[in-house]
């Protein structure tokens, strides 16, 4: 592919600031609105979900727009984007949009066009068999999984994002194309506890974790790292200054204080922490970001560790499936997963899902006290006794 020779000519490495364009910001969104959206901007009266993946919005001018939403893998080739553009050219006068969960939305103005578009979208498959544009993700469904870079691009992951997401979405596919749940279930993945994205506020969250402390490369650490920065990066104060036998400046880590967050590695390349056996996936549940019915909630850890069993993560996938199935059969209409767990009580959540309660799930960080039970209200379950045992109480 040729270098740009546009308005300002070719980039000249000898003179890098010549003709340099900067601080121009993104294109104004108005330019990319379909005319019908421009015309009815701010005038929408109501909307309905026609069927899974298809919405209709009705304006006070009488105009109607139909939106067909389909899944995307987020990580995509330019070739795939060109195919999206071809579809948009064919049915939508060249307009298309992506959602905040990286689904694709095609907008048309009649039900006949919806039918033709649906038929076309469902007919497109990758050579290996996966749908290119599965339709769904609306209403009480499991829509796309917000996720991160994993081994594709980041240097701090404890698991992979794209492969884990593919494995989970394959298993939950019928929930994407249907609207059979009590309420929407948001699933998110982050490959380390930097939590890029939405894991801390999702109904179900899969999070890459380490279980071993970093290795210290004493040979290079004082050359490649700013040591005070590294010391102050540790949430537990586990890192302190040290000297090698040769008298070089280095750091030491109090291993019994380290909880393997990997923050110090983010600051310092001489503290690698990734480990094949140690690394894996934790599962959190019960977060939400909307203010509907209840306040927004953080998700809570319910499974401390499952192995990184590449490429299909069977243990993780089965646990997620189980949580969704139990929630789907037990929760009330409109009840988000966190609302349900709080109503029945977390000991009942563990009993119903069959997830074992371990000491890892008991908060022990600074404000932990507020998460303990300062009440005699609880239900007699095996899980409640396990909490008691895990906390060192009566057994
Ligand atoms: C070592 C630290 C980090 C590195 C090297 C890193 C690197 C990157 C890179 C290369 C991208 C892709 C950018 C692109 O596609 O143009 C990205 C996207 C992103 N990062 Fe980070 N990042 C880091 C930490 C974080 C943290 C701490 C957060 C949030 C608290 C975060 C949130 C995001 C989000 C939301 C995206 C966009 C994802 C998407 O659009 O699909 N990142 N990051
Ligand atoms: C008043 C403040 C905010 C509101 C109303 C808001 C609202 C939303 C909504 C409605 C979504 C889409 C969720 C979904 O489709 O399930 C979303 C996604 C997201 N939000 Fe926020 N948000 C707010 C603040 C923040 C802040 C402060 C951060 C980061 C520090 C953040 C990070 C994200 C990320 C990473 C996503 C996922 C984006 C994606 O999938 O492309 N949000 N937010
Ligand atoms: S969650 Fe962690 S490992 Fe994953 S992309 Fe973000 S910083 Fe990298
Ligand atoms: S991994 Fe986290 S807890 Fe352990 S030493 Fe580094 S910053 Fe501290």
Image (cartoon, rainbow, N blue to C red):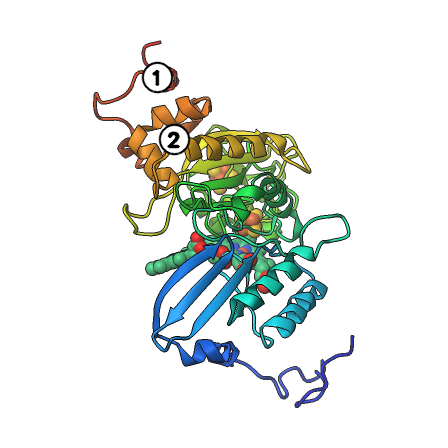
Q: x, y (%) of residue 102?
A: 54, 58
Q: Which of 191 and 44 is in front in this view?
A: 44
Q: Which of marks 1 and 2 is in front?
A: 2
Residue drawn 69% across the image and 56% down it: 123
Q: Crowding at label 1, few (<14), some or many (≥20) Cα neighbours within 10 Å?
A: some
Q: Nearer the viewer, residue 146 or 208?
A: 146
Q: In this view, does 103 lie above or below 26?
A: above
Is label 1 in contact with label 2 (beta carbons under 8 Å)? no
Q: Crowding at label 2, few (<14), some or many (≥20) Cα neighbours within 10 Å?
A: some
As helix, strand or loop, the secondary structure at mark 1 comes to loop
Which image quarter is the C terminus in?
top left
- Identify residue for label 1: 381
Q: How many angstroms separate mark 1 from mark 2 (CA)?
A: 17 Å
Q: Is residue 291 above or below residue 304?
A: below
Judge: label 2 CB < 8 Å from ligand 2: no
Say the numbered circle drawn on residue 183: none
Residue 95 appears anywhere in the view: yes
- Identify residue for label 2: 330
Residue drawn 27% across the image and 47% down it: 293
Does residue 108 appear to the left or right of 184 in the view shown?
A: right
Q: In this view, does 178 lie above or below 386?
A: below
Q: Which of 273 and 361 is in front in this view?
A: 361
Which image quarter is the N terminus in?
bottom right
Residue 340: image quadrant is: top left
Residue 250 appears anywhere in the view: no
Residue drawn 21% across the image and 24% down it: 375
Q: x, y (%) of residue 18?
A: 64, 87
Q: x, y (%) of residue 382?
A: 38, 15
Q: Nearer the viewer, residue 113 or 297?
A: 113
Residue drawn 62% across the image and 39% down it: 274
Residue 328: image quadrant is: top left
């Amino acid at each position: 592919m040729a270098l740009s020779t546009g308005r300002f000519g070719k980039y000249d490495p000898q003179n890098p600031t010549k003709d340099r364009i900067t601080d121009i910001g993104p294109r104004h969104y108005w330019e990319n609105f379909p005319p019908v959206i421009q015309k009815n901007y701010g005038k929408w009266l109501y909307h309905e979900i026609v069927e899974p993946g298809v919405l209709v919005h009705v304006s006070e001018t009488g105009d109607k727009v139909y939106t067909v939403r389909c899944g995307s893998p987020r990580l995509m080739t330019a070739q795939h984007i060109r195919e999206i553009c071809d579809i948009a050219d064919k049915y939508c006068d060249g307009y298309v949009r992506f959602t905040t969960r990286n689904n694709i939305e095609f907008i048309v103005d009649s039900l006949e066009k919806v039918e033709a578009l649906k038929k076309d979208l469902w007919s497109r498959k990758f050579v290996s068999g996966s749908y290119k544009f599965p339709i769904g993700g609306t209403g009480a469904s499991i829509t796309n999984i917000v996720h991160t870079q994993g081994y594709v691009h980041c240097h701090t992951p404890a698991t992979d994002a794209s492969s884990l997401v593919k494995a989970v979405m394959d298993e939950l596919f019928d929930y994407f194309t249907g609207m059979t749940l009590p309420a929407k279930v948001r699933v998110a993945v982050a490959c380390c506890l930097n939590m890029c994205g939405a894991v801390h506020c999702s109904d179900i969250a899969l999070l890459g974790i380490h279980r071993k402390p970093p290795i210290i490369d004493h040979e290079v650490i004082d050359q490649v790292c700013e040591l005070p920065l590294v010391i102050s990066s540790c949430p537990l104060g586990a890192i302190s200054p040290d000297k090698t036998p040769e008298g070089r400046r280095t750091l030491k880590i109090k291993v019994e204080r380290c909880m393997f967050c990997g923050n110090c590695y983010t600051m310092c390349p001489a503290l690698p922490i990734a480990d094949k056996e140690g690394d894996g996936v934790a599962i959190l549940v019960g977060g939400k970001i909307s203010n509907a019915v209840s306040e927004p909630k953080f998700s809570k850890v319910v499974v401390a560790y499952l192995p990184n069993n590449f490429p299909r993560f069977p243990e993780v996938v089965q646990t997620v499936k189980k949580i969704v199935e139990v929630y789907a059969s037990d929760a009330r209409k409109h009840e988000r997963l966190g609302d349900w767990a709080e109503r029945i009580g977390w000991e009942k959540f563990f009993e119903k899902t069959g997830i074992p309660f371990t000491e890892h799930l008991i908060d022990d960080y600074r404000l932990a006290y507020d998460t303990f039970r300062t009440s005699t209200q609880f239900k007699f379950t095996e899980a409640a006794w396990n909490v008691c045992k895990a906390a060192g109480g009566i057994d």
